[in-house]
Structure formats: structure tokens, C-alpha cells
Amino acid sequence: MIAIATAACGNGRPPTPSPPGTGGETITGRERIGWEQPASSTSELATFRYAVYVDGARAEISGTSCAPTAGASGFACSGALPPMAPGAHTLELAAFYESGGIVESAKSAPLRVTVTGSTSPVDATPLQPGDVVTTSDGVRLTAELLVSGLEDLVDVAVAPGGRLVIAERAGRVRIVSGDIVLEALAAGGGSPTRLRQGYGEFAEALRAEAKGLRYASPDGGLLSLALDPNFSDTGHLFVVHAAGDVFRLIRYRLADDRLIDRMAVIRDVPASADPSAAVRFGPDGKLYVAFDDGGSRDASARMSEWTGKILRLNPDGRTPDDQPAASPVFWAGLRSTWGLDWTTEDGTLWIAEQGPDGLERIRALVAGAERPRRAVQRASYVLPRPLGARGMAFYRGDEIRQFAGDLFLAGRDAGYLLRVRFDPSDPLRAMSSERLLEGRIGEVRAVAVADGALYVASATGVWRLSLEGTEDTGRD
């Protein structure tokens, strides 16, 4: 991502973006452009749109997304760059809104970039239900659209019986069962809503319902969710909220299509201006939660603080008795983490993170069976840029033998699902990668594996990719 900061201005116009310097960055052209947007509230922020001037030619920025909370300089926002030819270009950014016409800020100071390759968008048609997606090794996957019309989806899990549990950034959790969509947790604390999917009407209902409720959850926006391995018995769902400048890990219980019995497992862990976190259950039945460094590298190194850490907990929030020094810290020194999952063979934990150097990586962390359990890093790989990993899942199941041991990463910024293949004789050695669904569903926000199929989420919907010719017998 290339970054632009912002400074406020008056006269009733939107704040004028201003770059931190003259630039001179070399880019591929498929990065996202980022900036800090001053605004008095998320409601005011929602009125702004953005334009980028490339060598003086104006284009509206698409795919804009902003953090749910403001930092010292405003809300962290980003959007897609327009197509640019290889070579040197000058970029200027402006914010605008419509009020009886377009009211636009002054242009920012110029940011100079050099594009090393063509930025023409991938020649791909939007994915349609029934389309077949073919991988490089000949696997043919049938695409099924399970739900659409959602708003700013951030995570998805598959519950027993094939029900989908979906988190939206505004603070809503939805349950999708067949053609029924249930609002189990409301953004504004209101009563849950029961909606039958007629996709156009459903989308319109959600948009109307969301008006005025954006990021209004008492616990803050949602970042990640995980189901208890014994969900059928306990109904427990764990959710990471970002409320203001802190994280909260909350446990709920699903009963009568509502999330009740709220219990704070961890509260008020400092979060960064662009918060990132992930929560998942490991094969050992323990709860793992990763928090970003809260903007402090020093805090991420201190073992007494939970920022920049992966914590390993019992489901009730207590520290497992096999943790070193009676501390839940499993791994420390992280900057920003968006994904956790385990290989099925040896229980190795892989994480997707962005380091202080700006590079995204996957890392393999191994903890032995000895007591206390101490984790060590066994492998690390740099991910393609730009990727913007927003979730990861190893393939589990025997239905697609070619996927055995493969890792799938949701690439928000890149707009594709990244498949990483490992050496069958050495599960720590990545051999190759492949881009799936590139340019076909927009931003890829989350991925899950269940009943032998891939569940892939965009910002507004969830797709199921299953082996061609197989029937979906796991859903209601």
C-alpha cells in the first residue's frame, strides 16, 4: 500500500489530503492507496468520497474502506488505484461529497510514483452461481452463492449442519440457514431481525437497517469470530471487538437464534489506529487470540502486556497449566496479525502477519508436547504484494485430494484467493502458489474449510466452492 496522510481544512470543504513527502516510490500499480481522513464521526466520514488525480486526470477511488475508529490524525482509509501505464506518474488526492453538486477539497501535494508493470485490471468476469473454477492442476470447483447483500463482512465460520455464522464490521453477527438470514447480534443493540433471502430485497433491507447503526455496537466493530469446538452442545461463540482504541474478546451463547449471556474473556487491550486481530480454536481445544501491537513496538516485546501477542487460553479464559511461567503468551513481538490456522498432521500453527518492515508473511510456530509448552518458529515465507491477507485456512477433508495440506489465504487488497502448496514430504516447505478467483468477487475477506468445500467471502456475500459433481448435503 502507498500512503497519503491528511490535514484538516476549513471553509465547509472536506479535509485536504497532503502526502508526507514528494514520494518517489516504485510500485506495481496494484497496491491500494492509503490516507488518514479527519472526520468528527463515522457518520460524517460516511459522507466522503475520494478522487485521485493521475497526471492531472481525475478518477474516483473505488473499493474505499476505512477503520471503524480514528487515530491521532483521523480514520485510516484505503482504496484501489486506477489503471496506470508503466512509468513515472504524479498522484494527487482529494476528498469530496455531494450537496446540490460536488464539493471537493483542494488537491493534495503531489506524490510521485513509478509503475513497474501494467496495472490494467485482470480480465475476469464476475463470478456467477453455477460457474466452474478450474485450478492449475485440473481441479474443477462449482461455485454456489450462499448469501449476498451483506455489509462489510469481516469473518465467516461454518457451524454444524452447514449454518453460516457471519461477522460484519459494524458489530452485527448473522446466522444463515438455508434461505433464512438471522441477525443474532445487532450493531446497535436492538432486537435481532429475521429475513428471508430474496437477494435483491434482502440487500435493500440490510442497507436500510444499517442506516445510522454503522460501528454502533457497544463493544465496537467486529474483527474475528470463532466457534467453540463443542458448539452443538455449548452454543458458545467467541468474538473480537475493536472498541475505540482497545480490543475486547467476548464470549456469547447462541440460543433461540440470538447471542446472549455475554461474558468478557479479555477486555481493554490497547489497539492500533487500524486494528487487526484473529481468534481461532486449535487442535488442542485451546482458544488462541492474536492482537496487534497497539502502535507500540515496545509494548509488543513486554511479556506483561497482551498487545502484539498470540495468547493461548482455556475456553473459560483461564491460562492452561502447561503454559510457561503461568502466562497465556504463546508468541510475542507481532505488529499486525490477521490469520491463524493449523496443519492437520502435526498441529503446527501458521499465522499471517504484516511486520514492521511492511512485508506480509506466513510463519510456522511449533510447540512441543513437553511441559511447559514453548513455541519456536520453524518456517517463514514472504507473501506476494499487495495481498492484504484477511484470513487463512488449511484444507481439511478427503473430497479434493489435490488440496491435501494446501493453505488458502483471503487477499483483500489483491482481490484473489491465494493457494499455497506444500511439499507432501515436508509440510514446512512451501513449493508453489496459485491465484484463484482473481478479479471475480472483489475483495476477498475471509476463507473457511468445511465438509470438504471452500467457503470464500467477499465484502458482501459468501460463496461455496465444491468439487464439480458433488452434492451439498451438509446444509439445511
Image: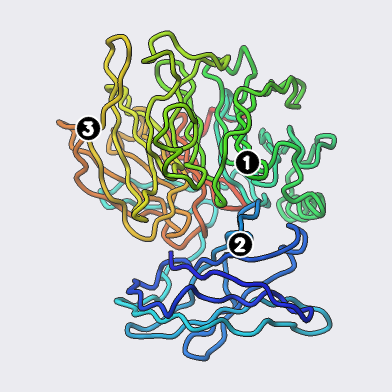
Q: Residues within 10 Å of mark 2 (few under 14, many from 20)?
A: some
Task: Give above or below for 83 relative to 249.
Answer: below
* Among the 4 quarters of the image, the one containing residue 320: top left
What numbered label is drawn on residue 378?
A: 3
Residue found at the far left of this picture: 425
The quadrant in which residue 335 appears is top left
Q: Nearer the viewer, residue 292 or 455?
A: 292
Residue 335 lies left or right of residue 126; in this view the side is left
Inspect the image, locate mark 1, and give the three-letter code of the amino acid beneath it.
Ala
Separation of disc 2 and disc 1 at Cα?
18 Å
> What residue sits right under mark 2 in the picture?
73
Q: Earlier in the sequence, mark 3 or mark 2?
A: 2
Q: Secondary structure at mark 3?
A: strand
Tag 1 or tag 2, which sits nearer the N-term? 2
Which mark is in front, 2 or 1?
2
Label 3 and label 2: CA atoms lie apart by 38 Å
